[in-house]
Image: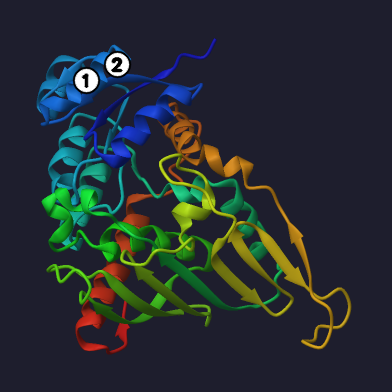
Amino acid sequence: MRKKTKIAVVGIGLMGSQHLKAIKNSKKAVLHSIVDINEKSRVHAKKFKVPFYKNSSALIKHNKPDAVIVATPNQFHEKHTISFLNAKIPVLLEKPISSNIEKAKKIISSSKKNKTNLLIGYHRRHNAIATKVKNKIIEGKLGKIVSVNVMCWLYKNKEWFKEKWRIKKGGGPLGINLVHDIDLICYLLGPVVYVQAFSSNKIRKYKVEDTAIVNFIFKSGVLGTLSVSDTIVSPWSYELTAGENPAYPVTDQSAYYIGGTKSSIQFPNYKEWFNKNERSWWKKIYHQDASTRDSRYTLVNQIDHLCDVVEGKAKPKVTGNDGLQSLKIFAAIIKSSKTGKKIKV
């Protein structure tokens, strides 16, 4: 019988709590311990009957796990992640990799120096629907990709903003939500070379944005647009359409639209649109659907992948360099949003 990988979780916030559930549902992993500065998180340790630590150094000194998930606020990613990498403990680091590019480079450098695996928590790459779309593109089923449109409209209530870091730099929808979309479109369509962005904070008037629009130019020549806001009541965001996170209600809508010269795809509510014979707007257009049931297990898939990496059976699907590239695109978006100018990544 396969020995289960012992995983510690650091930071029991929104995503940390979801990781606890994913580990419980994984057949390859077992929860090793919980680390959190907040004493209230001790209740989770009691629930899962595992040790509780107030800091990572105590965990490393007294009870090293096989791997660790770091799900702390962005500004603490460098400190925690490097401490584990220095102890030769593989890390699954929640997105984004860090709060700035220099810190991200230090994290990646530590991973290389210690020859210890670093995975970035862009869990959407582990979604069966995303894999299906990727394969369609690789196989040329869509023809030449022309454009992509992404919507991320949602409404965050007052409870969300009780965490004060969420109203400061890096805590808005660009930093919290958009980074996932950036990674996924790069995974599907390749590198981004230019961005142009506009942002606004006119609704909540916090120091951080609440709405933004971004234009992308990909290396392949594909053009893309992305609209993100956390002040709009709508069903059109990945979280509300994928069904992969039980914390969100599920709609039957989509958030991604990829257009090609042979057909177009919308997902996570997967439909592929095409003409059967002549391609023309005068001809009837058909669609082929696919089940999104497997999307519900994306976080568990990510945990299983971490276990495979720890055992040497797989290489990280989302590397530190992937996380760095997303951060560079994000930095270019922030820079562009201040001027409205096109910025090279």
Residue 326 image position (x, y, % from top left): 34, 63
State the CA–CA distance, disc 1 to disc 2: 6 Å
Q: Residues within 10 Å of mark 1 (few under 14, many from 20)?
A: few
User: Are the residues tagged 1 and 2 within 8 Å (C-beta)?
Assistant: yes
Task: Using the rendered image of the protein, determine whether residue 141 is visible from the camera's viewpoint.
Answer: no
The quarter holding residue 10 reads: top left
Which residue, as the protein is rendered here, is positioned at the far right? 277
Number of residue marks: 2
The quarter holding residue 260 reads: bottom right
Res 43 label: 1
Q: Residue at x 21, y 55 (%)?
A: 104
Residue 108 image position (x, y, % from top left): 25, 50
Residue 237 image position (x, y, % from top left): 45, 60
Q: State the residue position of label 2.
A: 47
Q: Secondary structure at mark 1?
A: helix
Q: Nearer the viewer, residue 338 or 313?
A: 338
Give the answer, above or below, for where 325 lies relative to 334: above
From the viewer's perspective, is 315 left or right of 55? right
The C terminus lies in which quarter of the figure?
Answer: bottom left
Residue type (three-letter) at the residue carrying disc 1: Val
Q: Secondary structure at mark 2?
A: helix
Residue type (three-letter) at the residue carrying disc 2: Lys
